[in-house]
């Protein structure tokens, strides 16, 4: 079974359009696509798409400007799964400046986080008790505002990232 062909159709500041196809007569029931990007060098993010059917053009939106993305895909066929195929693309535009975060303990279990940055975007707040946990499996939440109160465990020190 050959790997699928991923072709970048177009990209912009906040989206990527790509097509998927197989160069074989083997019946394809669908594809599994993973889109990876690195968040602030500490955290790799991933979005997974399950796509039904043989040929497909997909548009992935809500991406960040001037950010490298890796798209990997494999096909589900009547004979089993295909090998992985990869493609890399960098969205156009200027990457937004990193927000400036301030975190202040309100009491033993609540931390008020506030930051600067553009309006009308979604912010992710990640927090953990170590750099390893911050990289591998942080607690996280999202908001469109510029502040949030995070509930934490008492008697622990936390690292925060927005």
Image (spheres, rainbow, N blue to C red):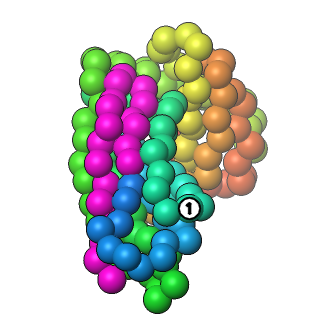
The residue wearing badge 1 is: 53
Q: Position of residue 87 (x, y in %)?
A: 25, 53
> Given the current orientation, which residue lies at the most extreme top position?
119
Q: Is residue 68 visible?
A: no
As drawn, is 25 to the left or to the right of 49?
left
Mark 1, other Cα within 10 Å: few <14 / some 14–19 / many ≥20:
few
Report the number of numbered marks.
1
Which residue is at a point 42% across and 52% down the rendered structure image?
35
Which of the two residues, 78 or 111, is positioned nearer the viewer here?
78
Q: Which residues are magenta?
A: 1-19
Mark 1, secondary structure of its residue: loop
Residue 10 occupies which quadrant of the picture? top left
Which residue is at a point 36% across and 23% down the rendered structure image?
13
Which of the two residues, 40 or 26, is positioned nearer the viewer here?
26
Q: Position of residue 1 (x, y in %)?
A: 33, 83
> Given the current orientation, which residue lies at the most extreme front position?
25
As drawn, is 21 to the left or to the right of 128?
left
Q: Position of residue 21 (x, y in %)?
A: 37, 59
In the image, is residue 97 above or below residue 22?
above
As drawn, is 119 to the left or to the right of 70?
right
> Given the current orientation, which residue lies at the most extreme bottom position?
79
Q: Position of residue 112 (x, y in %)?
A: 66, 28
Which residue is at a point 25% across and 41% down the rendered structure image?
89
Q: Is residue 17 visible?
A: yes
Which residue is at a point 47% across and 14% down the rendered structure image?
117
In the image, is residue 149 above or below residue 99?
below
In the image, is residue 125 above or below residue 92?
below
Which of the two residues, 53 or 147, is positioned nearer the viewer here?
53
Reply yes or no: does residue 125 show up in magenta. Answer: no
Reply yes or no: does residue 10 show up in magenta. Answer: yes
């Amino acid at each position: 079974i050959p790997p699928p062909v991923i072709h970048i159709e177009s990209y912009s500041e906040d989206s990527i359009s790509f097509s998927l196809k197989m160069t074989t007569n083997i019946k394809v029931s669908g594809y599994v696509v993973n889109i990876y990007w690195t968040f602030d060098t500490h955290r790799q993010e991933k979005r997974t798409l399950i796509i039904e059917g043989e040929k497909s053009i997909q548009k992935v939106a809500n991406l960040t400007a001037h950010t490298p993305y890796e798209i990997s895909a494999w096909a589900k066929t009547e004979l089993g799964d295909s090998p992985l195929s990869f493609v890399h693309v960098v969205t156009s535009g200027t990457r937004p400046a990193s927000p400036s975060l301030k975190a202040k303990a309100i009491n033993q279990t609540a931390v008020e986080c506030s930051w600067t940055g553009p309006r009308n975007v979604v912010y992710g707040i990640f927090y953990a008790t170590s750099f390893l946990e911050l990289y591998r499996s942080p607690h996280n939440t999202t908001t469109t505002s510029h502040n949030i109160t995070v509930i934490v465990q008492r008697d622990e020190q936390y690292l925060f990232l927005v």
